[in-house]
Amino acid sequence: MSGRGRLALCAFAATLMAAGALLPLVDPATWIVQAAVLLAVQSGAGALVRRWSSARALTVSVQAVVAVVALTVVFARDHAVAGLLPGPDAVQRFGLLLTAGADDVGQYAIPAPATDGIRLMLVGGVLVIGLLVDVLAVTFRSAAPAGLPLLALYSVAAGLSGGGASWLWFLLAASGYLVLLLAEGRDRLSQWGRVFGGAGTARGGRGAGRPDGPPRGGPLAPVRTGRRIGVVALGIALAVPAVLPSLGGGLLSGTGPSGGTGGGMITAVNPLVSLQDNLTQPEDREVLSYRTNATETSQLYLRLTSLDDFDGESWKLTERPIGDVPDRFPQPNGLSGEVGTTEITTSISASDSYAQVWLPMPYPATGVETEGRWRYESAGRTLVGDKGQTTKGVQYRVTSLIVNPTRRQLADAPDAPAALVREYTRLPSSLPADVRSTATRVTRGATNDYERAVKLQDWFAVEGGFRYDTEVSSGTGAAAISQFLKNKEGFCVHFSFSMAAMARTLGIPARVAVGFTPGAPQSGGVMSVGIRDAHAWPELYFEGVGWTRFEPTPTRGSVPEYTRPEAPANQPSAPPEPEASAAAVPSAQPSAQDSCPPQARRLGECGEPEEQGAAAPTDSGPPLGTVLLVAAGVVAVVLIPLLPLLWRRRVRARRLGTAGRGPEEVAARTLAVWAEIIDTAWDHGIAPDESQTPRRTAERIVRLGELDEAPADAVHRVAGAVEQVLYAARPLPTAGLAEDAARIREALAASVGRTGRLRALFAPRSAVRVVWAVTDAWATATGRWADRRRRLVARWPSAVRRPSRQRG
């Protein structure tokens, strides 16, 4: 194996070893196999190009093109041109996958599911780092700077794991870098001459025991060492990551389950990291649509999960066990039979552009009919996706309760269980004192927890002078709450987190729910929920009622009925006018849901998704200008390496296709064919010698090209025709010159092997004539300009001429 071959193998192994640090971030880790295969293809393409061309730019270009094509085949084959080349549809597909991958990174915890978007980001990132390492260490033979992209790959893994990356991963990445440095050192040393590798005994082979063979332990030593290094490095890169333990911690935000079907734990961190981005999107897009038999939808919040652990830095999810989804959910915690409830049914469809691990449902849900790998978390009464399951394109049916407590029931609620109070009133010691004092001041005069909760809600929503603003920094720590109480501007994160923290200071169990407001009615009784409907709200616990929603955020959502003031007793009751609800408006035409039998009313069994309220996603994807720009870039990347091939074919067709009838045309045609034969020989390794006569040139081509009798005769025949048109008084046409040129080209291609043929095809040496032509044209143009400038200066009057310097 050559020195560059060893370097390429070690660069490949070093990249994989550094990529091992990303393995704990995603489950399952099978993406590393895909990355290894594509990385091997990319590295192999570079090795092939380097065998028949020393052009560095060509090597890098071919590797980049191969990487783009490989990613297209794996991730966008159905959208590619001929299933291979990235066209506009494939570029748009990549854009959607990258957008979905970025959203997934912002939603899932370690280990995140290996969604298509995350796999594209991982595999594409490994290919980019691998290309940089290969370019630096192999193409430019400088392994030391290659440590920077390897370090970047490890740093990304360490950063996403919250700085908790194991030292084993660093050791693995560092080992790959050291192996690469060692291989480069051996390669540089071997270029100086004999490498002393010890007095080992050669077991046969060429030169073993022969006085004229290479000394034992000599030139074969770096070959053996390089092979050993490559094999060991490759083995470590593939084997060690598979047996090292996974890491814990959060990816960026969100959550993800672990464990098998019989149990497992759900370890989650803040899923609200991307909430501010959702609220500030330049264009709203639909993420959910639903139909419900509820008579009024203004209170129908779609809940994802709840955050119940406040550590002073942020609100998080507590690590809890998960299990199989029951057919019927248990009775909601704390809800007694004395509180009025109404069971409703809601059919929900998620957009293909919305991938979330939590299943949005009205609270409290009592049952869910859905397909896919979902697990049940009982404390929050939520469903969470397992092994990569998300809401993308999911359709499901939820039964839930509308809980209608009276103000008296909430005010007379007995004390909650002591264990529940301890868990849901826990506060960090770093909580500023003004949070507690403000809560006490705002709720002064209240006689029970219900009145305190209502006073807090009204103070935030109406009386406290707060302003809703999504541009405010989304800090959620203890200091951020104190700052929010002073500045009095923020969005739902600040309002919900602050009210929940203040309620805990008053001894009221509280947590923060995450989900969506009810959305907007559409035609046909469908409710549409957009990405800007993402929301957070506090839930407070009252024994006998359970977890109860409050709405402190001004201009968002709807205030619960049980928190509104009662009408005076001496006046007729005038309940507040409900918001317009498409579900409450009778339709002239029966909907598919109404006409469908109850036993067949599962989602998807009563007509097309549009009939069930699943409107088509409104996300139109990347702008057309961006798509065209990226497509143009991809086309340029693909075409640039093919320019020599295309130019050579164009020149050949022009030379061999010229008609010749008159003497001048006969001479031009014959000389054009001869020029083509000389360039063809040059492309196949026989450089031209312009000092030779046509006859000597023909002999040289036959000798160096090792041509057989037929192609040799063709070369001499064309050379004779050239001499005839050069020296004869009246040139006569010679038939079959183009056929002779084709016969010579085939013979030369057969004599150089596959590598020579590929080089002659894709990187013809004669293409340098383009550079010569450009240089000559530039020299001619600059010469003409210089002559013109001199003539112009010569015409100027002597008064405006620049005086020459004279001595004396």
Image (tube, rainbow, N blue to C red):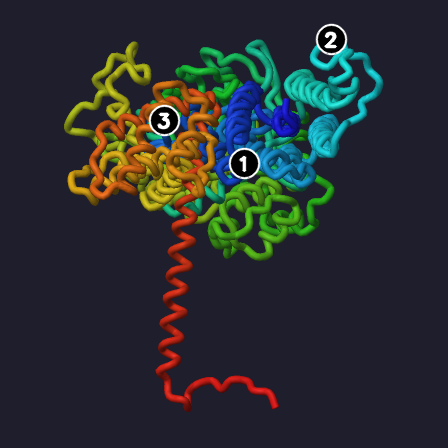
Label 1: which secondary element: loop
Upstream in sequence: badge 3 or badge 1 = 1
Q: Which residue lies at the image location 52% right of the left edge and 18% below the top edge?
A: 387
Q: Estimate the spatial distance between the alpha carbons at disc 3 and disc 1, rounded to whole Å.
A: 23 Å
Foreground mark, 3 or 2? 3
Q: Nearer the viewer, residue 565 or 734?
A: 734
Residue 133 to residue 115: above or below: below
x and y percentages locating residue 528 in the rendered image:
32, 34
**The image quarter in which residue 745 lies:** top left
Residue beneath label 2, please? Answer: 204
Foreground mark, 2 or 1? 2
Instruction: Check if mark 2's residue and mark 1's residue have beta carbons within 8 Å.
Output: no
Upstream in sequence: badge 3 or badge 2 = 2
Q: Residues within 10 Å of mark 1 (few under 14, many from 20)?
A: few
Q: Estimate the spatial distance between the alpha carbons at disc 3 and disc 2, rounded to whole Å.
A: 42 Å
Residue beneath label 1, please? Answer: 54
Residue 711 to residue 204: above or below: below
The C terminus sits in image quarter: bottom right
| Residue 439 in the figure: left or right of residue 44 | right
Q: Amino acid at mark 1?
A: Ser
Q: Which residue lies at the image location 61% right of the left edge and 34% below the top edge?
A: 138
Q: Amino acid at mark 2?
A: Gly
**The image quarter in which residue 345 lies:** top left
Residue beneath label 3, please? Answer: 745
x and y percentages locating residue 660 in the rendered image:
19, 38
